Amino acid sequence: MAIRCFVLDDEPLATDLLKDYISRLPDLELIGVSNSPTQALRTLQQMPVDVLFLDIQMPRLSGFDLLRPLGYRPKVIFTTAFREYALDSYEFDVLDFLVKPISFERFLQSVGKIYRFSPAVPILPESPEPIKASKDYQYFKVNKEMVKLFLEDILWIEGLKDYVKIHTVSGTLVSYLRISYLEEKLPPDRFARIHKSFIVALDHIQAVSATYIRINNEEIPIGRIYKAKLEEVLQRD
């Protein structure tokens, strides 16, 4: 399911740049572009989006002013030439804050955050049941690309300081991430941290001993402080 995006910036050159960046990623669907904040507000109220690329300093209506009456909260990525707005932007729980000029590489970092969150939901839900996103993949930055990995293909993840080595059924990738960040973002019913340097995919476990887990015929050590939590996870399964 494509992630619905809207771009609002009073500078046509800025919207053209983001249109080009979005067009390069097949999972992003650009459903609207505007250089007028007042017109964009009416459009967005009638047509909710998942992600809003939003300028802050605009005539008649700032990016902050536009969000308050919107009625729902999309994932917001602020795009601005003014760094001093960064602190104020976090009042709105923004996904990212991009300072112009925006490079494609920096844009990709923001996109990586988009894929780790659910689509927008109404502030006042229309139904009593929460809306949940069904997501069986994650994007990982590998060199200068955002590589899509299906969760079912991940065997285990190895932490290497500021990097992680992701072992999959088809090979190994290295991504610039901390293992503690992935521990928070990966679904706990499918992945478990068993060591300060290792997260394993529960579905791929072949055997468990007192000191290691075997996956794909490789023995992955179990850290002492993680042993009790691992036992709880395995018993739950």
Image (cartoon, rainbow, N blue to C red):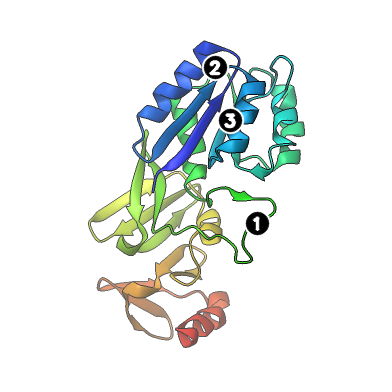
Residue at position x 46%, y 16% in the image: 16
Q: Secondary structure at mark 1?
A: loop
Q: Is residue 98 above or below residue 47?
A: above
Identify the disc placed on residue 63: none
**Structural distance between the alpha carbons of marks 3 and 2:** 27 Å
Q: Is residue 172 above or below residue 56?
A: below
Q: Secondary structure at mark 3?
A: helix
Residue at position x 50%, y 50% in the image: 116
Residue at position x 49%, y 28% in the image: 32
Q: Earlier in the sequence, mark 3 or mark 1?
A: 3
Question: Percent from the top left, x then y, of residue 194?
Answer: 48, 72
Q: Secondary structure at mark 2?
A: loop
Mark 3 Cα shell of 10 Å, populated few (<14), some (14-19), many (≥20): some
* Residue at numbered disc 2: 101
Question: Percent from the top left, x then y, of residue 231?
Answer: 50, 84
Position of 63 compared to 11: left or right?
right
**Structural distance between the alpha carbons of marks 3 and 1:** 20 Å
Residue at position x 45%, y 32% in the image: 31
* Residue at numbered disc 3: 43
Q: Are marks 3 and 2 in contact (CB under 8 Å)?
A: no
Q: Are marks 3 and 1 in contact (CB under 8 Å)?
A: no
Identify the disc placed on residue 125: 1
Q: Earlier in the sequence, mark 3 or mark 2?
A: 3
Depth check: 156 or 74 in front?
A: 74
Q: Nearer the viewer, mark 3 or mark 2?
A: 3
Depth check: 32 or 149 in front?
A: 32
Question: Percent from the top left, x then y, of residue 179?
Answer: 50, 56
Q: Where's the C terminus, which quadrant?
A: bottom left
Q: Amino acid at mark 2?
A: Pro
**Structural distance between the alpha carbons of marks 1 and 2:** 37 Å
Q: Is residue 7 visible?
A: yes
